[in-house]
Image (cartoon, rainbow, N blue to C red):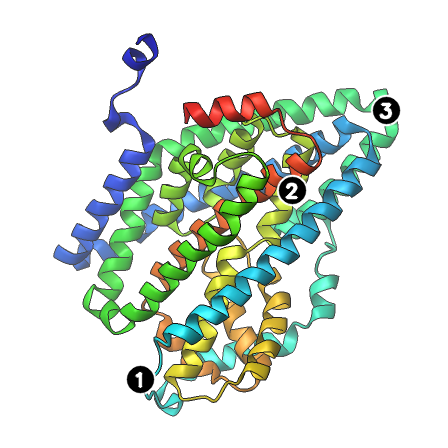
């Protein structure tokens, strides 16, 4: 009874505030589109404030987590388990995405002539595809400058430098303790900044949704409603048939986990940016009882390699565009598409806008689906991106707890206690 009386009013809950911001944003975008179109900076400023500290948070979390362990064998073991998990689950996501789009066929009957579509996107996409192959992707993992990696916000490069720096500190033993204390204090300071920034999250969601609705309108979404519905159904199927069983095997409920991260999940629906919640996920996963070294290794790596929702999106949209343009795409061609997506999906960044660039690069690599057809889904991309970023976040949280479970690095009592408290 005492705990219930101490609960804060519902209108002070961040989940309610962000949801309210989304609803008000839709209303403003529909009723006053000119005003809504001018509200885009509200969302952009919020995302930039988060991006401003994400690189440093990754560095501090990974460095402190690994260097505190001092067992480099354990670090390698965590990394191998995480990468195997990522590849298996994202492969399953691609298969589910391909099967669902082939069964429901939302693009069949559109009879779009790709020649009438604007070619600007196509040209840019082909150039990007020609410039970036798998070899260059591997080369780009290594920064030419550690400072440059932070300046450009490249998560993979920051992660690589952080791991090497942490291993160097771990090798020094007690000598590294003063540096570790500075790193830990810096991390706590950055989390304080995030808690302050999160207070404007409802305003950011309001501005982002108002701009989206004003820019594209509700009517423009109707012709592609079948694709949106198909993709939403695919996301639900993936959550129920893949992530829910994995969670059950690891001793926790997927839905309890989603409730625990409800504020972050509602926020990504409004901003379509997974970067906007990375610091909060790091803090709350540690609070769940997952060992700091596991969180520090798995979560940042998952942001670059464990794109469950993005894989569902790529599979669905690529085949949808083939259906819409009447492009013949048999199962052999789709198997080739799946293999290409296994590589290109790893290049997606946390900000959902990059998905269009990666999709364009993928279509150019297939040499079958017209690259210019990407213009067809620009109107609903924002809606689709909200869905796949949502699934990405849930998948990354499940992956972190699952790897911690296999490493016996999760405090089971604390996990259940936190999930029950919500």
Task: Give the quadrant of the C terminus.
Answer: top left
Image: 418 above or below 41: above
**Labelled pair 1, 2 in contact (Cβ < 8 Å):** no
Q: x, y percentage for residue 313? A: 46, 64
Which residue is tagged 3? Answer: 173
Circle 3 packing at 10 Å, graded few (<14), some (14-19), many (20+), is: few
Secondary-structure class at tag 3: helix
Mark seen at residue 110: 1
Circle 1 packing at 10 Å, graded few (<14), some (14-19), many (20+), is: few
Circle 2 packing at 10 Å, graded few (<14), some (14-19), many (20+), is: many
Say whether disc 3 or disc 1 marks the residue closer to the N-terminus: 1
Residue 148 in view, yes or no: no
Foreground label between 3 and 2: 2
Say whether disc 1 or disc 2 marks the residue closer to the N-terminus: 1
Q: CA distance from mark 3 to mark 1?
A: 64 Å
Foreground label between 3 and 1: 1
Q: CA distance from mark 1 to mark 2?
A: 42 Å
Q: x, y percentage for residue 187? A: 60, 28
Q: x, y percentage for residue 33? A: 18, 59
Image quadrant where residue 399 sits: top right
Question: Residue shown at 77%/38% (left/top)?
Answer: 75
Question: Residue shown at 62%/22% (left/top)?
Answer: 185
Which residue is tagged 2? Answer: 298
Residue 150 in view, yes or no: yes
Mark seen at residue 270: none
Say whether disc 3 or disc 2 marks the residue closer to the N-terminus: 3
**Residue 383 falls left or right of residue 341:** left
Image quadrant where residue 206 sits: top left
């Amino acid at each position: 009874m005492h705990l219930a009386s101490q609960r804060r009013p519902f209108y002070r809950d961040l989940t309610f505030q962000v949801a309210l911001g989304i609803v008000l944003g839709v209303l403003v975008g529909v009723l006053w589109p000119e005003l809504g179109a001018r509200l885009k900076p509200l969302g952009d400023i919020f995302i930039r404030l988060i991006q401003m500290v994400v690189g440093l948070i990754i560095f501090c979390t990974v460095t402190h987590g690994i260097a505190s362990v001092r067992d480099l064998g354990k670090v390698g073991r965590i990394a191998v388990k995480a990468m195997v998990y990522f590849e298996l689950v994202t492969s399953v996501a691609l298969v589910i995405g391909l099967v669902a789009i082939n069964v429901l066929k939302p693009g069949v009957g559109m009879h779009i002539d790709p020649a009438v579509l604007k070619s600007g996107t196509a040209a840019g996409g082909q150039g990007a595809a020609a410039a970036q192959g798998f070899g260059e992707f591997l080369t780009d993992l290594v920064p030419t400058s550690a400072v440059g990696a932070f300046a450009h916000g490249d998560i993979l490069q920051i992660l690589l430098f952080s791991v090497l720096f942490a291993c160097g500190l771990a090798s020094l033993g007690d000598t590294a303790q003063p540096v570790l204390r500075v790193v830990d204090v810096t991390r706590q300071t950055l989390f304080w900044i995030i808690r302050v920034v999160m207070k404007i999250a409802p305003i950011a969601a309001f501005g982002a949704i108002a701009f989206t609705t004003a820019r594209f309108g509700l009517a423009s979404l109707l012709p592609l409603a079948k694709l949106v519905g198909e993709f939403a159904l695919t996301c639900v199927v993936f959550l129920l048939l893949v992530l829910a069983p994995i969670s059950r095997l690891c001793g926790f409920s997927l839905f309890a986990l989603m409730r625990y991260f409800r504020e972050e999940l509602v926020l990504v629906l409004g901003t379509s940016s997974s970067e906007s919640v990375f610091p909060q996920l790091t803090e709350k996963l540690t609070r769940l009882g997952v060992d700091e070294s596991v969180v520090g290794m798995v979560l940042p790596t998952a942001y670059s390699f464990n794109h469950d929702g993005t894989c569902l999106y790529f599979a669905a949209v690529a085949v949808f565009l083939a259906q819409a343009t009447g492009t013949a795409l048999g199962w052999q061609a789709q198997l080739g598409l799946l293999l290409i997506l296994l590589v290109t999906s790893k290049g997606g960044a946390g900000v959902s806008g990059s998905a269009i660039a990666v999709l364009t690069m993928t279509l150019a690599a297939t040499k079958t689906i017209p690259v210019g057809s990407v213009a067809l889904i620009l109107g609903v991309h924002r809606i689709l991106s909200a869905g796949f970023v949502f699934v990405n976040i849930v998948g990354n949280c499940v992956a972190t707890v699952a790897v911690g479970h296999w490493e016996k690095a999760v405090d089971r009592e604390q996990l259940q206690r936190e999930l029950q408290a919500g």
